[in-house]
Image (tube, coloured by chain):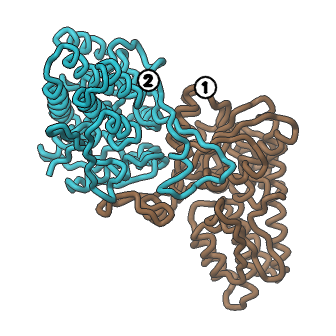
Chain colours: A brown, B cyan
């Protein structure tokens, strides 16, 4: 019973509605570009690699509708969320095929398959890091839900487990949208991987008291120098991990690397609806007169990263640019 | 319309029920030691100085009931929460009077008045730190609700405002129990102090992007060397503040200082019900099969503290032991 975040058959994009989890397993059936864009914007599908794949199929649906030029379709889907680099890579993969007169379904299927394959490679490459590591902290959800299958941060843990590693995962709940307590916990519980959900505030306590052996997260966009955007709160965990000598890993497929961006300074950070902070499940948390702010991502400088786990292997930040150049030349 | 967390008249301890805020302003009327202990345990009253004052009156109620020895009463109230040092100071102040045959109401009233006076002194001592500071981050609630009146962390901000400082406060929501979004935001909104509530995860982002000029928090227990316990998440903010060169202040009355404890290593950290993490307002957040962990405090080493704001003035961690010795000798 593998988790699959999305799949496509005959004009219908199926999405596991990540807003309904873990309470309900609900599948959305999308037939239009616009409903796909809405699903991305409202985070029915989220996680950079899954967003990229959903957008690729959104392009397919847009072409089938016959109402959009390739550029229009790309623009509509590209306006949904600004931070994840994968969104633009997924759109571009299908736009090219569309303009060239190639089969767009094939292009989207190939994009999706490549993501899944790369996540499996990440798992294989990263698993040795967790062969003797016992207690791992992760933030947000960088599992199968975020990446179609396997996961980025969770892939090395899954492969390490298959190879016999005994792992325990600290799951940051990840306010405001609780991707940790709702989604990562759901994935881990399904596979009977020992874990505990904690308030984001508690991560520092466990890091400082020697109860975390490694931290691993995914990413939404990684600059050439290794600065990266990820779910809000990632930066603080990285700083506190380094302060305590705990290794901090970032796992991502190629589509997350923004090779033309020299560093993280100019990565756009999405600010979402303040209601995500001031309400939960329709229940008001803050007083009426209190405004909220809701940045969805933060930028972690490369100096806090022990290593990146890529489809081509584990690489230190200093060696990242060279690896990316080699990959771009090969690709 | 000053906020008062609690007041006592003729055998009745009145508590503003902090579990009901900000939705409802509800006053509990307590007539027994046991109901006072329950109110402390369930956090109807919370914040170290308010807990100390509530426990002092809990002793008064216990004496009136005529069912307890002073030692029994002290033990029952002392077993409610382990971390706040003030709890034991408040209990001891009344136990002594009880044993000596003095008026226990007078002892409790004196304890309460001293806390309020010290918090006002903290405000006066700390206000100059915020004369030119514009944007302040605070964690949890260290306002009037936590300290009977005035606040510890909020007192210097209140006095600075009275003196004309223009302040903006970033309010960490403070999961799991949301003392920031529920209580600090409520206090600030009442006084029209500009503020915004943020997810705890967002504090690092604002610290790293130059949008926080100072951090100030309260404390639950401070060791002689300046290591201190405070609401879970405080440690991470302190580490990230120092990483970004942002001053980090800790404000507390004398009752929070545990002068016989040389450092923070042995301060007991309360672990509370995991349901506080896995549910919110009766709404389940995590999957059924997912356990949670819920440490309520963390220990921040003194090296992350820029200065302590005490009733006797602002003092660097290195000078703290000397100040405490002087205060103990005087007291």
Left or right of A124: which side holds A28? left
Work out whether residue A135 or residue A106 is closer to the camera in this orientation and state it: A135
| Residue A210 numbered tag | 1
Left or right of B33: which side holds A176? right
The image shows residue B220, relative to residue B223, as above or below, that is below
The spot of residue A147 in percent (x, y) is 73, 58
> Quick one: SS at disc 1?
loop
The spot of residue A32 in percent (x, y) is 69, 83
> Quick one: SS at disc 2?
loop
The spot of residue B192 in percent (x, y) is 21, 56
Rounded to the nearest whole Å, what is the CA distance between mark 2 and mark 1? 15 Å
Work out whether residue B66 or residue A132 is closer to the camera in this orientation and state it: B66
Q: Residues within 10 Å of mark 2 (few under 14, many from 20)?
A: many
Q: Residue furthest bottom?
A: A66
- Return the residue at label 2: B301
Q: Quadrant of the C terminus of chain B?
A: top left
Work out whether residue A123 or residue B246 is closer to the camera in this orientation and state it: A123
Residue at the (84%, 63%) spot, across then down: A113
The spot of residue B7 in percent (x, y) is 19, 40
């Amino acid at each position: 019973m593998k988790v699959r975040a999305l799949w496509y058959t005959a004009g219908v994009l199926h999405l596991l509605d990540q807003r309904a989890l873990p309470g309900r397993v609900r599948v959305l059936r999308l037939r239009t570009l616009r409903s796909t864009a809405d699903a991305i914007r409202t985070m029915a599908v989220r996680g950079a690699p899954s967003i990229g794949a959903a957008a690729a199929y959104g392009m397919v649906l847009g072409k089938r509708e016959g109402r959009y030029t390739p550029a229009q379709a790309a623009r509509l889907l590209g306006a949904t969320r600004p931070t994840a680099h994968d969104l633009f890579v997924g759109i571009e993969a299908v736009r090219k095929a569309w303009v060239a007169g190639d089969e767009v379904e094939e292009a989207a299927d190939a994009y999706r398959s490549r993501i899944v394959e790369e996540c499996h490679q990440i798992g294989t490459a990263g698993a040795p890091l967790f062969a003797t590591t016992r207690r791992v902290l992760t933030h947000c959800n960088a599992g199968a839900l975020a990446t179609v299958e396997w996961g980025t941060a969770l892939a090395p843990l899954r492969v390490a487990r298959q190879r016999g590693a005994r792992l325990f995962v600290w799951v940051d709940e990840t306010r405001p949208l609780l991707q940790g307590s709702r989604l990562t916990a759901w994935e881990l519980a399904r596979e009977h991987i020992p874990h505990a959900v904690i308030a984001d505030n508690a991560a520092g306590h466990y890091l400082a008291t020697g109860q975390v052996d490694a931290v691993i997260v995914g990413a939404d966009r990684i600059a050439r120098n290794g600065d990266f955007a990820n779910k809000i709160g990632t930066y603080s965990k990285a700083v506190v991990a380094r302060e305590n000598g705990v290794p901090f890993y970032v796992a991502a497929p190629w589509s997350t690397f923004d090779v033309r961006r020299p560093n993280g300074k100019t990565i756009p950070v999405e600010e979402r609806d303040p209601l995500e902070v001031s309400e939960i499940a329709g229940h008001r948390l803050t007083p009426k007169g209190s405004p909220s702010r809701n940045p969805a991502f933060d930028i972690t400088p490369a100096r806090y990263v022990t290593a990146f786990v890529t489809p081509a292997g584990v690489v230190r930040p200093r060696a990242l640019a060279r690896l990316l150049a080699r990959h771009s030349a090969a690709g």
